[in-house]
Amino acid sequence: MTRHRTSRISGYLAGFITLCAPGLSLAQAAASGSVTPAPGAEIQQVVVTAERREASLQSVPITVSVVTGETALKSGITTSEDLALAVPGLQMDLNGIGLSPFLRGVGSTFYAPSAESSVAIYEDGGYVPSSEGALFNLNNIDHVEVLKGPQGTLFGRNATGGVVQVITKVPSSEPSADLSIGYGNYNTSTLSFYGTTGVAAGLATDLAFYADDNPDGWGHNFFNGERNYKYENIDVRNSWLWQPRESTRIRLALDYEDTTNEAGLGFKPLPGTVSLAGTTYQGFYSTDANLQDRTVMHQGGGLLQVTQDLRFATFKSISTYREIRPNFLFDQDASPLPIANLHVYSPDNSIGQELQLVSPDASQVQWIGGLFYFHDVAGASPIDIGGLAAAPFNQVSIAARQHTDSYAGYTQTTFEVAPKTHFTAGVRYTDDRRSIGGTTSAEGAGVLASATQSADFRKATWRLALDHQFTPDVLGYVSDNRGFKSGEFNTSVYTQPAVKPEVLDAYEIGLKSEYFDHRFRANLAGYYYQYKDLQVTELVAGADYVLNAAKAEIYGLDADFTVIPIRNLTLNASSAFIHGRYTSFPNAPYFPPVTASICSPGIGAVGACTIDATGLDTVHTPSFTMNLSADYAKPTQIGPFDIAAIFYHNDGFYWDPANQLKQPTYSLYNASIGWMNPQERFGVRLWGKNLGGAKYYSYAITQTLGEDFSPAPPRTYGVTLSAHF
C-alpha cells in the first residue's frame, strides 16, 4: 500500500525538484571544487532555545541534551522513539497507541485518550498534546533539545518531567536538495527527500518527505498465519519563510502523516506466565491472538510563527493547529479466545496561541514575558468492547470527550547580582478548565449510562536559579523549580472523578565546563525531586482506571563527557544514575497471577488487589543508563569516509508500581559506515541497529488478564544510497 501512495506523491516531488532546478546548477558548480575541509579539532558549539531565546548550550543553567540531525543519521536515530539511545535518563516507551516519555523517572502511565504526558513535546515552539502525535520521523530536523527537570515557567504545559523540543530545518533561499533510498532486512524500504529553494525576494520554501514500508514484520501470529509487527508510513512537511524586511520574520509550516503500525502492540504472555485464557509464551516475536493488533493513524497540522523586532524587545506569536485521527485494534487478552477485543477511535483536535515579548540579546537585564492559550477536544469516539468483557451483550460502546481550556501567563528575568554571577527568577500561573461528557451503550439495549463532569485546576509554578561564570569555559549553577501536571478526567471511565494534579519540586546543582582548547567537555548535574500525587493507571478488562499515588522521592546524577583525542575523532560518554522510590503509596494496584486465588478488589477496579508500595521503585526508573558513542571522519582522495557507533545500556526497571513486572537489563549497539564521492554529491551508507540482537520490551503491562509484553525490534541492517544537489 505504501508503494502506491508513494507514487501518488512522486509528482509533488518532481515539481519541487523542478522548482529548485534553476539554482541547482550553481550549487553543483560549487560542489565540483575541492574536497570539503575536514572538521576542526574543537567540540562543536551548539545553540539551543532552552530559555526561549537562542544561547550557547554551555551558557544555559539547565541540563540539556542535544541530538543533532547529523548525529541522528549516523547513529540510527530515525524516529522520536529512538531518542532514548542518545539521552540517558530518557525513556521513550512505545505502547502501541503512542509514546510514553519518562525523564529522570518522571512520566505518566495514564494512556487514556486525551491524557497528556508529563514530559511535554514541542515542535518548533508548538505544543504536541497527545501521545499519538509524539511518534514521528526525524528526517528534516536541525536538532532535538531534551530539557531535564520540570520546566514550569517558560514551557509549563504539563512539563513536570522535562521538555523534548524538536527544531526542524529552516527554509533557505540557496537551492539544495537531498535524496536517499534505503533497503534493509525484513524487506524494509525507505525513501527520504529534503529540498529547499528561494521563490521570490525574501521568500523561501522547503519540502521534507519520508516513506518507509516493512511488509514482512518480525514474527507470526499463529492464530491467523499473518506476519507480525509490520509497519508503513508516509510523512510530508512543507514550510515557508517570508522576510519582507530585516526586522520581520514569518514562518508557516504544514505537515501530514499517514501511519499503519503494529509495533508496541501484539501482546503475548511473559515467559513462565499463563493468560486468563490459558495461553502461554509462544516465542519472543510470535503471538497467538484472534485479533491482529494494529494502529492506523492520520495526523496533520499547521504552525505559524511571526517574529517582529521592536526597538525595546522582540515580539513573537506562535499559533498552532493539530488534528490526530488514531484507530487501533487491540486483543487485550492476548489469546485466541474472544475475551476482550477492543476497537478504539480517539480523535484529538487542538489549537494553541502563545504571545511573547523578549528582551534584546544585548540587554544587561534579560527578560521574557508571555501569554499562552490552549484548547483541546479529545476522547473516545467510541471504544468498542467485544468478547466476554462485553457480556451479557455482544458489544459495548463507550463514547466520551474531554474539553480543555488552559490559560497561562508567565515571566522570567535574569540579571547580574555580582561580577559574573546571575540570578534568575521566573513565575507562571496556569488555569486549566476541563469538562467531560460520556455515554455507554450496548447492541440491542441502547444507552446504558451517561454522565457529565467539570473541574478547574489552578497552580503557580516557578524557577529560581543562581549561576556563576568561574572562567570563560566553566559555569556553575543551582536552581529550584516547581512543575505542575494538571488534573484530568479519564475518558475510558468517564464516571471517575478527575485525578488530582501532580506537583514536583526539583532542586539541582550543575557544572558545565570545557578544557584543553575546547577539546574536552564535562557537564555534570545532581538533583533531588519531591514528587506528590503521581497519576498512575491500572488496566482491567476493557478499561483503564487512573488514581493518584501519594508521594515519591527521586534523586540522581547526570554526567556527560565529550572529547576529541585526535583530529576528526569525537568520543562521547553519557550516563544517568537515578534512585526513585515511593515514600507513600498505601493503595498501589496489584494483580496476582491469574492462577492464584482471587483477592478482594481494591480502589473500585474489577479484579485488582492493593498492596502498600511504600519503599518500592517508581515505575520506568532505571537505576543506571548510559551511552558511549564514537564518530570518526576520514578525508581521502576518493572521497570522505565516516564511521559512527553508539552503545546504549539500560539497567532495567519496573513497569508497574507493585514491582511485579521488570524490564530486564539490556544493551544496544548501532553502527554505520558512510562514503561520499570527492564532490560530496553521491554516497552510500551501511548501517545496523541492535546489532547484538538484544531481546527487550517495547512495552509491558500487568492487568487482570495476565502479564503481557510487546517486543522491541530485533537486529536490523541495510544500505542507504544518497544524493546531494
Image (tube, grey):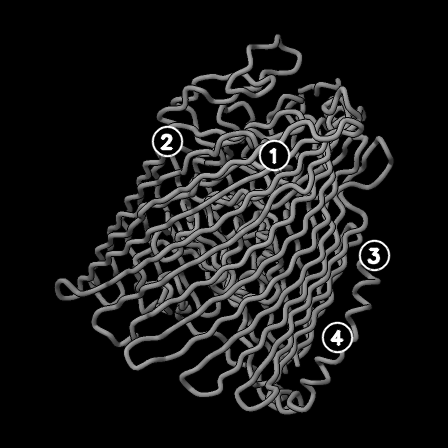
Q: Is residue 446 left or right of residue 491?
A: right
Name the residue beneath numbered marker 3: 1
Are the residues at dot 2 and dot 1 in contact (C-beta closer than 8 Å)?
no
Name the residue beneath numbered marker 1: 492
Q: Quadrant of the C terminus?
A: bottom right
Give the residue type at disc 3.
Met
Nearer-N-terminus badge (3/4): 3
Q: CA distance from mark 1 to mark 4?
A: 41 Å
Percent from the top left, x then y, of residue 292? 79, 37
Compared to 204, does 632 lie above or below? Answer: above
Residue extending farthest to the right is 225
Which label sits in the foreground, 1 or 4? 1
* Quarter occupied by residue 96: top right
Badge count: 4
Tell me, yes or no, if residue 666 can be seen here: yes
Q: CA distance from mark 2 to mark 1?
A: 26 Å
Give the residue type at disc 1.
Ser
Nearer-N-terminus badge (1/4): 4
Are the residues at dot 2 and dot 4 in contact (C-beta closer than 8 Å)?
no
Q: Is residue 289 left or right of residue 635?
A: right
Image mark for residue 165: none
* Quarter occupied by residue 233: bottom right
Name the residue beneath numbered marker 4: 12
Are the residues at dot 3 and dot 2 in contact (C-beta closer than 8 Å)?
no
Q: Is residue 54 left or right of residue 94?
A: left
Name the residue beneath numbered marker 2: 552
Percent from the top left, x then y, of residue 365? 22, 69
Compared to 252, does 529 lie above or below? Answer: above
Mark 1 residue element: loop
Q: CA distance from mark 3 to mark 4?
A: 18 Å
Give the residue type at disc 2.
Ala
